Image (tube, helix red, strand yellow):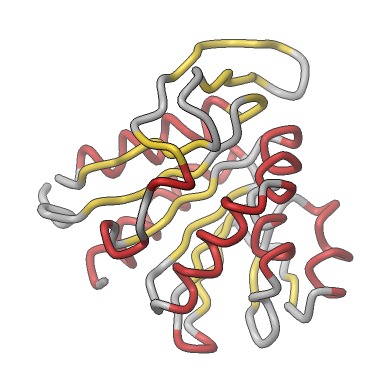
């Protein structure tokens, strides 16, 4: 399968708290589809993954620092979840600016679980429909988005594609949808 051949996909995390499965499973899906994933974080230090919010797991070395990348170098963006990770991503000015740049460029974004917090912070949800971990519902609606409780949701409104899912149990559907959408970018 080579639907993403020649496509560079950015994966945006913080240094700590990314849900391991929500990073590694979409990463594998991008690789399996022939794409080139790139791990981007605020610092060059290792990214600490978690299983849940308590158990530290594997560390991953970022390929690039958020402040040093250009949206022009990528075809799409994945924002994994993890409560701590997502909270730190939305608090990082460079990360939020990168999300805004992907939207302004009309490039597709896929976000899972708590990952949509970055979209809330970026102010890019008016007119969009999405799903997420249920506790983000109020944040999403207060930010102008419409929240649905579905395994995966693909929204094309407002001139850019957004693929979202609720949690790690939705990864198969999330991976399938993001590779389909990214292949069209």
**Identity of the residue drawn at 64% across and 19% down:** 51
Residue 107 placed where, x, y %? 38, 71
**Identity of the residue drawn at 54% across and 25% down:** 20
Q: Is residue 117 toward the left or the right of residue 44 in the image?
A: right
Which residue occupies the foreground of this view, 176 or 96?
Answer: 96
Q: Is residue 178 toward the left or the right of residue 31 in the image?
A: right
Q: Is residue 162 toward the left or the right of residue 52 in the image?
A: left
Residue 164 placed where, x, y %? 56, 60
Residue 35 placed where, x, y %? 20, 47
Count of numbered badges drawn on the protein? 0
Residue 27 placed where, x, y %? 35, 37
Q: Quadrant of the C terminus?
A: bottom left
**Identity of the residue drawn at 72% across and 70% down:** 148
**Identity of the residue drawn at 24% across and 51% down:** 8
Choose top left, top right, bottom left or bottom right for residue 6.
bottom left
Choose top left, top right, bottom left or bottom right for residue 159.
bottom left
Q: In the picture shown, does residue 175 fall above or below 63?
A: below
């Amino acid at each position: 399968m080579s639907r993403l051949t020649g496509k560079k996909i950015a994966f945006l995390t913080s240094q700590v708290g990314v849900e391991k499965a929500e990073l590694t499973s979409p990463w594998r899906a991008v690789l399996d589809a022939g794409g080139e994933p790139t791990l981007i974080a605020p610092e060059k230090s290792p990214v600490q993954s978690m299983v849940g919010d308590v158990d530290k797991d594997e560390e991953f070395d970022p390929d690039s620092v958020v402040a040093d990348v250009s949206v022009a170098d990528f075809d799409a963006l994945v924002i994994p979840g993890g409560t701590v990770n997502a909270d730190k991503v939305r608090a990082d000015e460079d990360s939020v600016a990168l999300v805004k740049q992907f939207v302004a460029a009309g490039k597709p974004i896929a976000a899972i679980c708590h990952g949509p917090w970055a979209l809330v912070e970026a102010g890019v949800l008016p007119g969009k429909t999405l799903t997420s971990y249920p506790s983000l519902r109020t944040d999403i609606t207060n930010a102008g988005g419409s929240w649905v409780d579905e395994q995966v949701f693909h929204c094309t409104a407002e001139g850019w594609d957004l693929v979202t899912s609720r949690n790690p149990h939705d990864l198969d559907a999330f991976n399938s949808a993001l590779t389909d959408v990214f292949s069209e970018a």
